[in-house]
Amino acid sequence: MKEEEIRERVRQELSPARFAHVEGVVQTAAQLAERYGVDPARARTAAWLHDLAREWSVERLKHAAENIEIPSGFGLIPALLHGPIAASFAVEWYGVDEDVANAIRFHTTGRVGMSTLEKIICLADAIEPGRAYPGVEELRAAAQKSLDLALLKSFDATLRYLIDRQQPIFTLTVMARNEFLEKTREEAE
Ligand SMILES: Nc1ncnc2c1ncn2[C@@H]1O[C@H](COP(=O)(O)OP(=O)(O)O)[C@@H](O)[C@H]1O
């Protein structure tokens, strides 16, 4: 599996702006992988592929979802389908392992019991250098200290964002946030 091949495929699927975001996620994921003892090559693969289906229409996503096993609840919020669909194509086209597939599958939502690689991709998506929103610097600093603490802050921000806009919330994200709250409280004791 050649990184260059994956990169070009992803470039074909995305607008230049989104491709630049993905390049940022690759860079940040590789750095976090070094920092937290994960194979950077696997982190780069997951990062390259995480937004593969991000610009597909809702119709195309729903059509693709008919032939794919989608974890429960994803189908109710079409904006979230791109993760599971990208994961499925990453397995089919490039034979990525289960951990890489799950990092892609759950990159937007998180879930309970995330692996270190899953945490890295989810966080890299939120803090890559192209991201600019209030609080992103605090998240970048937290990411160098504790993945759990940074993800707690990141999910808190996502939940606030969704509530403020009266958007539906995927329940796994709430459960993941509660798990990180408990873990970081235990670590602080
Ligand atoms: N946990 C969640 N529950 C419900 N909707 C979510 C959740 N996280 C993100 N979303 C929605 O999905 C959309 C896509 O998220 P994401 O892929 O992270 O966006 P971005 O394009 O900024 O990377 C967001 O705009 C948001 O409306």
Image (cartoon, grey):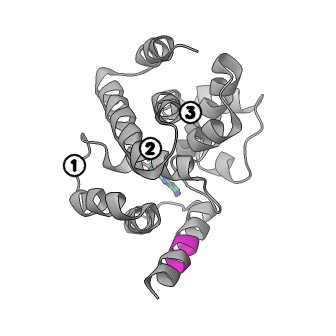
Mark 2, secondary structure of its residue = helix
Q: Determine whether the beta carbon of the residue marked 3 sits less than 8 angstroms from the nearest atom of ligand 1.
A: no
Amino acid type shown at disc 1: Ala
Residue type, label 2: Ala
- Count the marks: 3
Instruction: Report which residue position mark 2 lands on.
Output: 33
Residue under label 1 = 132
Q: Main secondary structure of the magenta part?
A: helix
Q: CA distance from mark 2 to mark 1?
A: 22 Å
Q: Are marks 2 and 1 in contact (CB under 8 Å)?
A: no
From the image, tell me which residue sits under label 3. 58
Question: Which marked residue is nearer to the observer: mark 3 or mark 2?
Answer: 2
Residue 66: name its quadrant.
Answer: top right
Q: Position of residue 110 (x, y in %)?
A: 56, 55
> Earlier along the polypeptide chain: callout 3 or callout 1?
3
Magenta span covers which residues?
178-182
- Residue 180 highlighted magenta (yes or no): yes
